[in-house]
Image (cartoon, rainbow, N blue to C red):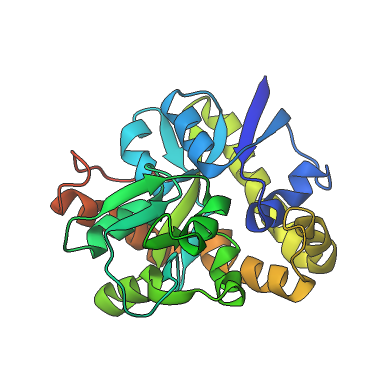
Amino acid sequence: MLISIGHSPDADDAFMFYALSQRKIKVDFAYTEILDDIQTLNEMALRRVLDVSAISLAVYPLINKDYVIMRSGASMGMGYGPIIVAKKNNFKMRTIAIPGKFTSAFLALRMFLDKDVSFVFCPFDKIMGKVLSDEVDAGLIIHEGQITYKELGLNKFVDLGEWWYDKYGLPLPLGVNVMRKMDRKIMSEISHAMRSSLDYAFGHKKEALKYAMKFSPGLEEDKVEKFVDMYVNDLTIDLGTTGHKACQFFLDEAYRNDFIDRSISIETV
C-alpha cells in the first residue's frame, strides 16, 4: 500500500518532515510526498484526496468521519500566532486580506472581531503587499511573515495567539496532521513514523534547519530557526493533555459562536 503524505512547503513543516522527506529513518510502508500551500491541502482534505496531510484545525469538523488527528505534528502558538498588520497604528479596519477561508487563522480572526469587515482572500505571501499598496486596510499574516513584517514598515494591530492566551490561558492551535481511518496496524506505523521524524529532526537540528532553509529563500538562518522554534515545540512532538484540550476548546468555542455548524469530539492517534 502506497501512503500519500501532504504538507506545506514552508520551514516548520519542512523541519518536521525532514527525516521522512530525505529517507533518514526506516519505515514499514511505502509513501509519496505532496507539497502544497495550506489552503490547497485543506481543499484536498475536503475531497479526501490524501492518506496523511497537514491541515488547518478549522477544517477538521468537516472531515472527522474519515480522518483522525495525529498526536505528532501539530503547530500551536504558545502565546503568539497569526498577526493582523496595517500601515498605520490608527486605522479603520474595513477590508482585511486573509490567507484562506478554511485556515485556523481566519477562524480565530472571526472569533476576535466584533464588527463587520470585508475579507479579501489571497495567497499568504501576497498579503503584506496588498497592505503596503493600500488595496486593503489590514492583513492577517501567517508563516514567516510573523517575524518579518516590521522590516517592511508594517505595524502590529493584534497578535491573535497572544489575545487567545490572555483570554483563555491556552495555546492557539493552528495546524494539525490528520490520517485517514484505515487498518489500525498501518495507522500505528504511520503515527510512529511521524514521531520518529520529529525525534530525528530535534536530534539533528543543524542539518534539519539547513534543509528547512530551502523553503524560506532569502531569510537569514537565525530567523528561520526562530520561526521553526515557534511552531515546532513540545506540543508538536506530542499533543499531550494540553494540546488535546487546546484543540477541543478551539473547536468548541467556534461552535458556540456559530462559526462551525456542529459540535465534535476530536479523535487522535
In depth, the one of 164 and 19 nearer the eye is: 164
In depth, the one of 114 and 51 nearer the eye is: 114
Q: Is residue 104 left or right of residue 40?
A: left
Residue 79 visible, this orientation? no
Which residue is depicted at the point 77% across and 43% down?
A: 21
In depth, the one of 203 and 120 nearer the eye is: 120
Name the quarter where the N terminus is drawn.
top right
Placement of 46 over or under 190, stated as above or below: above
Placement of 2 over or under 34, stated as above or below: above
Q: How many marks?
A: 0
Which residue is depicted at the point 38% across and 58% down?
A: 244
Q: Position of residue 165 (x, y in %)?
A: 34, 75
Q: Position of residue 194 (x, y in %)?
A: 64, 47
Which residue is depicted at the point 70% across and 49% down?
A: 17
Q: Is residue 117 left or right of residue 227?
A: left
In depth, the one of 263 and 193 nearer the eye is: 263
Q: Is residue 80 left or right of residue 225?
A: left
Q: Position of residue 161 (x, y in %)?
A: 39, 70
Q: Position of residue 146 (x, y in %)?
A: 54, 68
Residue 54 visible, this orientation? yes
Which residue is depicted at the point 40% across and 77% down?
A: 88
Q: Based on the displayed image, in which of its 4 quarters is residue 163 positioned? A: bottom left
Q: Residue furthest top?
A: 1
